[in-house]
Amino acid sequence: MTRHGQATAWLRLLAAVWLLAVLAIAAHQWRFWSAARLDTDVMALLPRDEHEPAVAAATQRLARSAEGRVVVMLGAASDGDARRAAQAWRLALPAALGWREQRVDEAAAAASVAFYRPWRDRLLTAGQREWLVAQPADVAAERALSALHQPGPGGRLTPWAADPLGLWPAWWAARGGETLARPEQGELVLASGDGAGRRHWVVLLYDTGRPAFALDGEARIADALATAEQAARAAVPTLVLHRAGLPLHAEAAAVQASREVNSIGWGSLAAVMALVWLAFRRVRALALVALSLGIGVAAGVSATALVFGQVHLLTLVFGASLVGVAEDYGIHWFASRQAAPDEAPARLLRHLLPGLVLALVTSVLGYAVLAWAPFPGLRQMAVFSAAGLSAAFLTALCWFPLLDGRAPAMTGLSRRIAASLARWPRWHGQAAQTVGLVALGLVLATGLSRVQPNDDIRQLQSSPAALVADQREVGRLLGLPSPGQFYVVMAADEAGLLAREEALTARLAPLRASGVLAGWQALSDWVPSPDRQRADAALTARTEAAVLQAVNSRLGESITRPPFAAEPLTLAQWRQGAAAAAGAHLWLGEVPQADGGTAVASLVMLRGVEGAAALPRLAAAADGLPGVRWVDKPAEVSQLLGRYRASMTWLLIAGHALVLAALAWRFGHRAWRAWAPTAIASVAAVAVLGLLGMPLQLFNVLALLLLLGVGVDYGVFLLEHRGDGAAWLAVVLGAASTALSFGLLAVSSTPALRAFGLTLGIGLAAVSLLAPWLRAGRDTPDATPSVLTAP
C-alpha cells in the first residue's frame, strides 16, 4: 500500500471510531433532553461558602425556607375592596400551577396557646420583667382587681387566677410583632399609610410545591399571575399589587437565559454560516461546518451533564458563544483546500495538523483556566467549552478529509482577504510607527488610570427591576427579616445556645430603641433559656402570690394560683410541639466544629435594618460575645470576588509567561510576535473599560484568561504559515466569527456574561488587528513550511 493509501486508511479508521463516539453522544442527548436536567439557580455562579459549617448551614437553611414560597399582596383603599380583589384573584389563578395557599389556621393558633399554657408563668417580655421588679405589690394588686372587674374575657388567653396581671397577651403580642400582618376574619391583613394614602392589604401566601429552580425557561408562573391580576383589577380597578418570592426570580432568570440561548446561539450560527458562504460558496462547506458545530455543542452538553449531573442554563447561554470558536477548524480546512485544490486531503491535513493542534491546546487551556476559579457555574462553562471545542476539532480532523469532496473555488471575498495580507502594514520600528505607538500608549494609560475595581455582588443582580422593587416593598410592608445579614449563634448545648442568644438580643435592644433596626427573630424569644425561665418563674410566683393575697384580703375570697410546669421548657420539647412552625427556620441543629467536635447552632435574623450605614453597628453588637458570629453575605461574597479577582490577575500574568515560554520553544526568538498581540489587546480591553467608566470585576479578568487561550491562535497561525494567504483568510474569518459570537454576550441581561462578552469582544478585535501588524518581517516559509501559498 502506498503512503497515501495508508494515510487514507487511517483516516477512515478514525472516522469510524469518531462515528461511534458521535452516536454515543446522540444517545446521551436523547436521554438528557427527555429528563431536562437544567439548573437555573443564578447563585451557582458564586463560590461555595468558605466559612465554618454553621454559616454554610445557615445559608442553606435560608435558601430552603424561601424555596417554593410566593407572597402576593393586594392593596386597596378599603378593607372590603382588598378582600374582594383577593377573592377574584383566587378564582382566576390557574389551578394548573398546583400551588397550595397557606390560609389563616385558627385551630393551629389555639394549639400553640395550649402548648405554652403549662409554662405561662415564665414567658415575659423585657418590659414586663422590669415592671414586675419595680412595682410595689399594692400597685400590682390594683391592676389585677381592675382586670378582674372588666366585663367579658378582655383578651385573656387563660383564666384570671392563672394570669391575674394579664401578662400573657402582651407576650403573645410581642411574638406576633415579628410580622406586621394580622389574621382577621379568615384573611391575613394589614394597613399602611395615613390619611388619603392609607391602604388596606390582603396577604396571600403560597407554597409552589416544587423547588424554586425546577424550571424549564417557560414563563408559566408569570403568565398565571398575570391572569389572576387581570381578574383582580377587573374587580377593583384601583388595585395595587406586589409579589415576591424566589420562584419568581428563578423563573425570570430561566426565561431570560432561554431567550438569550436562542438569540446568541442562532445569531452566532447565522453569522458564522454567512461568513462561510461568502468565503467558500459551497453548500457542503456550510453543512460540514454546521455539523462540526452541532456535534461540538452536543458533546459540551453531554460532558457537562456527565461531570456535574446537570447543566446550568447559563452554561448553555455561554456555550452558545462556542459557535464562534468551534468553527475555526472547519474554516482553516476549507481555506486551505481553497488555496490548494489539487493537494491530497491526507497530505494537506498533515501539514495543517501542527497548527491546528497548537490552536486547540491553547484554546482548551484558556477555557480550563476558568475551572481554576471556585465557581461551580464557571467550571461547568469550562467543561462545556473544552469538550465542545475538542469534539468540533475531532469532527474536522476525522470527517472533513473524507466528506469534503471537490475543493471550493476562490470567491471574490476570499481572494481579497487572502491578498490583503501582503498589503497589511507591519511593525518595522520606523519613526512614524513609534510616534503612533506612543500616542496609543498614552490613550491606554489614560484608560488604565481610570479603571476602578468594584466587586460588589449587587452589581451582578440580573432580576427585572420591577420584581426587585416588589420584593423590597413586600419586605418593608410585612417587616420580613433580611436574608442577607444575620447572626449565627453556636454553643455546646441547647441551654447555652439560648443564653448566648439572650446576651446578643440584650445588645440589640438599644439599637432597636434608636431606630437602627425594627426588631429581630430569635429562638430565645419563643423558648427562653433555662436560667431565665427559672428567674422569671420565681419573679411571677412571688409577685402573683402577693397580688392574690391582697385581692383575697379585699374581696374575702380564697383564690389560689394554679400550678405550672416544674421544669423549664426545652428546645427539644418546643420543636415537637404545635408552636414550632413559627421559628423552625431559625434552628440549625448540630454542626461540625474545627476541632472535630459538634455544636448546636441557630440563627438570629433582623427586621427593618435602616440601610448600609447601620451594618457596622450591627456587626459590633457581636464583638466579644462567645459563639456569636455576624454574617453579611453580600459583603462577604463581594470580598471573596475581590480576592479571586486579585489571584486570577496573578494567574493571568503567570499564564502569559507560560504561553510565551511555550511559543519560544516552538518559534524561538520570533515567539514574541505571536504573544504580543494578545498581551497588548488585554491591556487595551482593560483600558477601554476605564474609558467607558465601567468597573473591573472578576469576570473581566476571567475573560482575559480566555482571551489568552483564543487570541494567541491568530499569531500562531501567522507564524506557522508565513506569507500564506489561506491561513490569513482563516484567521480573519475565525476572528470575525469569534468576536461576533462573544460580542453578542455583551448584550446579555446577565451582568456577569455581559462583562465577559464585552471584554472578550474588545480584546479579540484588537488581537485581529495587531497580529498581522506584528507578524514576521518577511512572508517566506520558515522551518515548518505550509504547502499553501498566497493566491
Image (cartoon, rainbow, N blue to C red):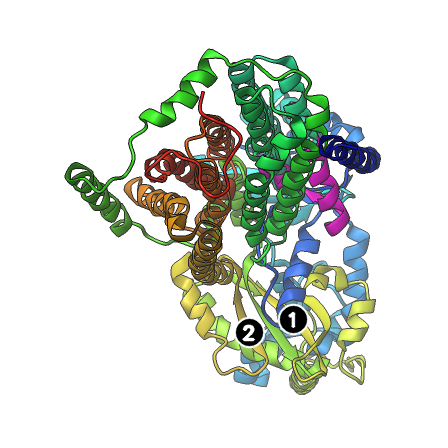
Instruction: Reply above or below: 123 against 183.
Output: below
Q: Position of residue 681 (x, y in %)?
A: 37, 43
Q: Classify residue 626 as left or right of residue 678.
A: right
Main SS, magenta residues? helix
Against 470, residue 400 (above or below) is: above
User: Could you tell whether 746 is left or right of 431 in the image?
Assistant: right
- Residue 63 visible in this rendered orientation of the protein: yes
Q: Residue under circle 2?
A: 629
Q: Nearer the viewer, residue 91 or 261?
A: 261
Q: How crowded is the residue under tag 1: few (<14 C-alpha within 10 Å), some, or many (20+)? A: many
Residue displayed at 24% across by 48% down: 445
Q: Is residue 234 left or right of residue 468?
A: right
Mark 2–mark 1 contact, CB under 8 Å?
Answer: yes
Quadrant where the N terminus sits is top right
Residue 311 in the image: state x and y as whole percent.
Answer: 70, 43
Q: Which residue is mark 1?
A: 54
Q: CA distance from mark 2 to mark 1?
A: 10 Å
State which region is magenta: 295-318
Identify which residue is drawn at 36% across, 40% down: 776
| Of callouts 2 and 1, the N-terminal one | 1
Q: Residue at x 25, y 51 (%)?
A: 449
Name the kind of residue labelled 1 in the image: Ala
Q: In which quadrant of the rendered image does the C terminus lie? A: top left
In this rendering, does residue 227 appear at all? no
Return the mark for residue 646: none
- 307 in magenta: yes
How far from the left and from the top, in percent, is residue 196? Answer: 44, 34
